[in-house]
């Protein structure tokens, strides 16, 4: 839909579209994102979210850039903080989950994030390339050519788990549990995961917390050459060390963020290549195109769909005057396909020069693990095309998650190797 041809819309239409998006179980959310972006000023109230949904690029970038107006200290006002006060295990979970630095503003955010300042430098990430390549080859060797399989559970989910487990210093036999724990913990941040589903996710997340707490204690007592050892001995910019619970919360975040980002990138990236065979052929012939292709995959189908902020003062977003204390949900995939910012935004263009997408967000909360995610994507796709040069889409359709609005990656992605 072009801006010039945008039709008039009834007052009820945005609310209905938002409800369809959040609770309608739609397979493909992108047409709804596009409609909401082009209606009015692209800002819409949601009863389900109890906040405003923001969909245009400049709006989302403003929210990400102005941390003084749009606070990240949102945990206690979100569904993610839902718990049973009488349940001691719920209280233990909340005490840890509330300490993530992504839910903090400066100076707390600055202090905690500074612990990672040596962990994800270009030099540190470059040293992990050998590990990522080794893990990818080992997992690909399990699959003979010519077979059709769903690549999501057996490969896309396993690669990032194996990589982050190795980086953190976790034994290989724990990888299956890491994937289960990671998915459960990620589910606790989704506003539609409540009731019995949330109870189950909390129980499973506590298994993760208990394991990582033991790992942190071990590395404090006997450091090794792994990321947890580096983090527990790195002083913050204030000259102190993170406390045990603070450290536990950040390590758990690394696990979840690292897994979800790369798993989603593999499923979405393969789907985009299958849907755009000319691009696939170009990349097969010239692997130097992979870095740009990875950026385009991230732009057009990002791993994270919503980021939440809380206004600290009265502010205007679009044509809406939002009072202090308003909850704002920034819709990253809608912003990444905004025609006001990107030429021909629906097209998968591996030669796109100006590709300042918001998939890793912007400003002080720019994803600390972005360099690792980009490295994993490049290495994984390079090895897939080496091992299976004729890889193609399988007969069964690829299906997205419909039970998680924050992470809408593919549940299934059938391929023929």
Image: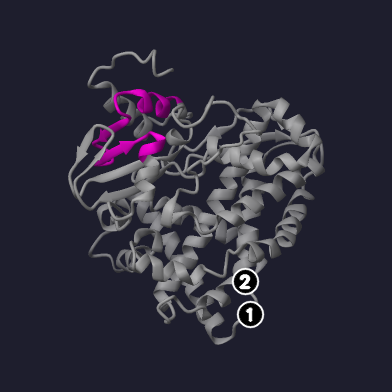
Residue 190 visible in rendering = no
- Residue 77 got which mark? none
Question: Label 1, on which residue?
Answer: 224
Give neighbour class at mark 2: few <14, some 14-19, many 20+ (Cα, 10 Å). some
Residue drawn at the location 54% of the way across and 34% of the way down: 300
Q: Say if 41 sits above or below 52 in the image.
A: above
**SS at badge 2:** loop
**Would you say 308 lies left or right of 366 here?**
left
**Separation of marks 1 and 2 at Cα, in angstroms:** 8 Å
Taking the magenta stretch, the answer to whether it contains residue 39 is yes
Q: Nearest the camera: 410 or 32?
A: 32
Closer to the N terminus: mark 1 or mark 2?
Answer: 2
Taking the magenta stretch, the answer to whether it contains residue 100 is no
Q: Report if the CB atoms under discs 1 and 2 are less than 8 Å apart.
A: yes
Question: Residue 417, image x and y in percent?
Answer: 77, 37
What range of the chain is rendered magenta?
A: 31-59
């Amino acid at each position: 839909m072009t801006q010039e041809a945008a039709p008039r819309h009834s007052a009820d239409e945005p609310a209905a579209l938002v409800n369809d998006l959040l609770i309608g179980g739609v397979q493909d959310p992108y047409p709804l994102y596009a409609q909401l972006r082009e209606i009015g000023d692209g800002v819409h109230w949601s009863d389900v979210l109890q906040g405003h949904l923001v969909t245009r690029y400049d709006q989302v970038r403003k929210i990400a850039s102005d941390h003084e107006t749009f606070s990240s200290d949102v945990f206690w006002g979100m569904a993610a903080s839902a718990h049973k006060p009488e349940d001691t295990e719920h209280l233990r979970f909340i005490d840890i989950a509330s300490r993530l630095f992504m839910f903090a503003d400066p100076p707390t955010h600055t202090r905690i994030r500074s612990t990672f300042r040596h962990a994800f430098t270009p030099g540190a990430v470059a040293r992990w390339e050998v590990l990522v390549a080794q893990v990818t080859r080992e997992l690909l060797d399990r699959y003979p050519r010519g077979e059709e399989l769903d690549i999501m559970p057996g490969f896309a989910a396993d690669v990032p788990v194996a990589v982050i487990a190795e980086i953190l210093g976790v034994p290989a036999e724990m990888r299956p549990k890491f994937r289960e724990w990671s998915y459960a913990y990620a589910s606790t941040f989704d506003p539609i995961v409540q009731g019995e589903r949330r109870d189950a996710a909390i129980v499973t997340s506590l298994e993760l917390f208990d394991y990582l707490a033991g790992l942190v204690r071990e590395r404090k007592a006997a450091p090794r050459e792994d990321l947890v050892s580096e983090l527990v001995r790195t002083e913050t910019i204030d000259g102190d060390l993170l406390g045990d619970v603070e450290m536990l919360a950040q390590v758990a975040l690394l696990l979840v963020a690292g897994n979800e980002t790369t798993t989603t990138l593999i499923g979405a990236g393969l789907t985009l290549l299958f849907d755009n065979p000319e691009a696939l052929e170009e990349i097969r012939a010239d692997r130097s195109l992979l870095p740009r292709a990875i950026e385009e995959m991230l732009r057009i189908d990002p791993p994270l769909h919503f980021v939440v902020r809380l206004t600290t003062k009265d502010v205007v977003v679009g044509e809406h005057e939002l009072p202090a204390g308003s909850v704002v949900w920034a819709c990253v995939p809608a912003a990444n396909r905004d025609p006001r910012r990107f030429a021909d935004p629906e097209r998968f263009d591996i030669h796109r020069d100006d590709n300042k997408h918001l998939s890793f967000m912007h400003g002080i909360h720019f994803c600390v693990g972005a360099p690792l995610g980009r490295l994993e994507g490049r290495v994984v796709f390079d090895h897939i095309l080496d091992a299976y040069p004729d890889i193609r889409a399988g007969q069964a359709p690829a299906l997205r998650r419909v039970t998680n609005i924050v992470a809408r990656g593919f549940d299934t992605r059938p391929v023929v190797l």
